Image (spheres, helix red, strand yellow):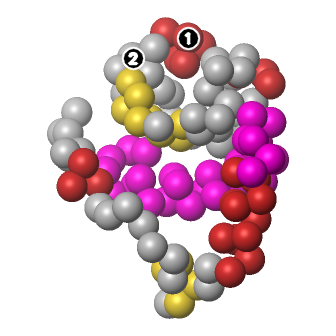
Amino acid sequence: EVFGATQADIAAPSPGRKNRVVLGQVGIRCIHCAHLSPRDRVKRAACYPPNVSGIYHSVSNMKFDHFGACRGLPPEARAEFQSLRATCGRKGGRSSCPTDGPSSKRGMTSSST
C-alpha cells in the first residue's frame, strides 16, 4: 500500500533506517499488518524509498525480509507467497514472474525535495 507518513509513522521505532522519515514522505507498507502496533510488526513492514526508482528495491527487500514472517498475513496469502517464491526464477537479476507494471503507470513521479 502506498501512503504518506504521519506523525505516528515518524515516531515509530525504525532500527537500521539510515535517513529520518519526514511528515508526508511517501512510503509503501504491508497491507496485512499495517493495522498492528509498530512493535508487533516484523522487519520492513514499511519502507520509504528515496525516489520512484527505489520502489523496486524496497519491494524486493520486503519480499525477502518481511512477507515470510509477517504476523498479519492470512494463511492463504502465505501459501501463495511461498508457492510464488518457490516457482518464480531469477534471470539476470530480475524476477521472471509478472508484475503490475511500472510506477509511472500509477501516476508516481520523484520530487526534487
Residue at (29%, 61%) from the top-left corner? 102
Residue at (70%, 61%) from the top-left corner? 80
Q: Between disc 2 and disc 1, whose residue precedes? A: 1
Q: Which residues are magenta?
A: 49-76
Residue sitting farthest toward the top: 7
Q: Nearer the viewer, residue 24 or 75?
A: 75
Classify residue 12 as left or right of residue 22. Answer: right
**Element type at marker 2?**
loop
**Element type at marker 1?**
helix
Examine the structure image and report whether residue 73 is included in the region drawn in magenta.
yes
Residue kind at label 1, given as amino acid type: Ala
Can residue 17 be seen here? The reply is no
Spot occupied by residue 64 in the image (x, y as percentages of width and height): 69, 60
Spot occupied by residue 30 in the image (x, y as percentages of width and height): 59, 38
Q: Which mark is residue 106?
A: none
Q: In the rendered image, which residue does mark 1 sit on? A: 8
Residue kind at label 2, given as amino acid type: Leu
Residue sitting farthest toward the front: 76
Spot occupied by residue 56 in the image (x, y as percentages of width and height): 44, 60
Examine the structure image and report whether residue 71 is included in the region drawn in magenta.
yes
Q: Nearer the viewer, residue 79 or 18?
A: 79
Classify residue 57 as left or right of residue 51. Answer: right
Q: In the rendered image, which residue does mark 2 sit on? A: 23
Q: Nearer the viewer, residue 109 or 16?
A: 109
Residue at (68%, 81%) from the top-left corner? 87
Q: Estimate how packed mark 2 is, as few (under 14), some (14 to 19) or many (20 or more) residues with alpha carbons within 10 Å.
A: few
| Figure check: 62 above or below 39 | below
* Quadrant holding the C terminus: top left
Classify residue 71 as left or right of residue 33. Answer: right
| Figure check: 2 above or below 102 | above
Can residue 29 be seen here? The reply is yes
3D distance between C-alphas at marks 2 and 1: 9 Å
